[in-house]
């Protein structure tokens, strides 16, 4: 349970203090960081972080923009 909270807080810090200063590059909605937060909330720290990692690997300039929610 504590790892879930820790990871979510790290993502919140990234979204608040780092993300605003870098060029938007995520081609998905929700963004990869928000998707990872939602996956951690739904599936727990291990599986949620893994799903977020896989999502980031799919996020590249040649990927078409599309809606891809946590299922």
Image: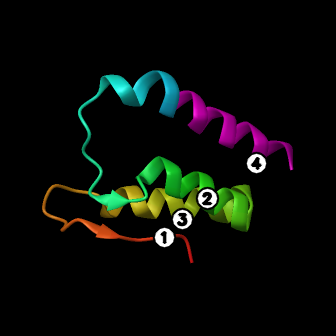
The residue to which callout 1 is attached is 69
Please report the residue visible at 18 percent of the width from the left and 68 percent of the height from the top: 64
Q: Give the class, few, some or many, for how many residues have Cα within 10 Å of label 4's Cα (few <14, many ≥20).
A: some
Q: Give the class, few, some or many, for how many residues have Cα within 10 Å of label 3's Cα (few <14, many ≥20).
A: some
The residue to which callout 4 is attached is 4
Q: Give the class, few, some or many, for how many residues have Cα within 10 Å of label 1's Cα (few <14, many ≥20).
A: few
- Spatial CA distance of label 1 from label 4 is 19 Å
Q: Which numbered disc flags the more N-terminal residue, 2 or 1?
A: 2
Span highlighted in magenta in the image: 1-14
> Quick one: SS at disc 1?
loop
- Estimate the x, y position of residue 3 in percent, counting from the top left: 78, 44
> Quick one: SS at disc 4?
helix
Where on the picture, by quarter, is residue 51? Answer: bottom right
Q: Which numbered disc flags the more N-terminal residue, 1 or 3?
A: 3
For discs 1 and 4, the disc positioned in front in the rendered view:
1
> Quick one: SS at disc 2?
helix
The quarter of the image holding the C terminus is bottom right
Residues at circles 3 and 2 in contact by the CB criterion of under 8 Å: no
Check residue 25 for magenta coloring: no
Q: Which numbered disc flags the more N-terminal residue, 1 or 4?
A: 4
- Spatial CA distance of label 3 from label 4 is 14 Å
- Spatial CA distance of label 4 from label 2 is 11 Å
Q: Is residue 26 left or right of residue 64?
A: right
């Amino acid at each position: 349970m504590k790892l879930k909270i820790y990871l979510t807080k790290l993502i919140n810090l990234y979204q608040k203090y780092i993300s605003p200063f870098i060029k938007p590059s995520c081609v998905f909605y929700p963004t990869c960081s928000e998707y990872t937060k939602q996956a951690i909330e739904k599936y727990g720290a291990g599986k949620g972080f893994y799903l977020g990692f896989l999502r980031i690997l799919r996020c590249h300039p040649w990927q078409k923009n599309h809606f891809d929610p946590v299922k």
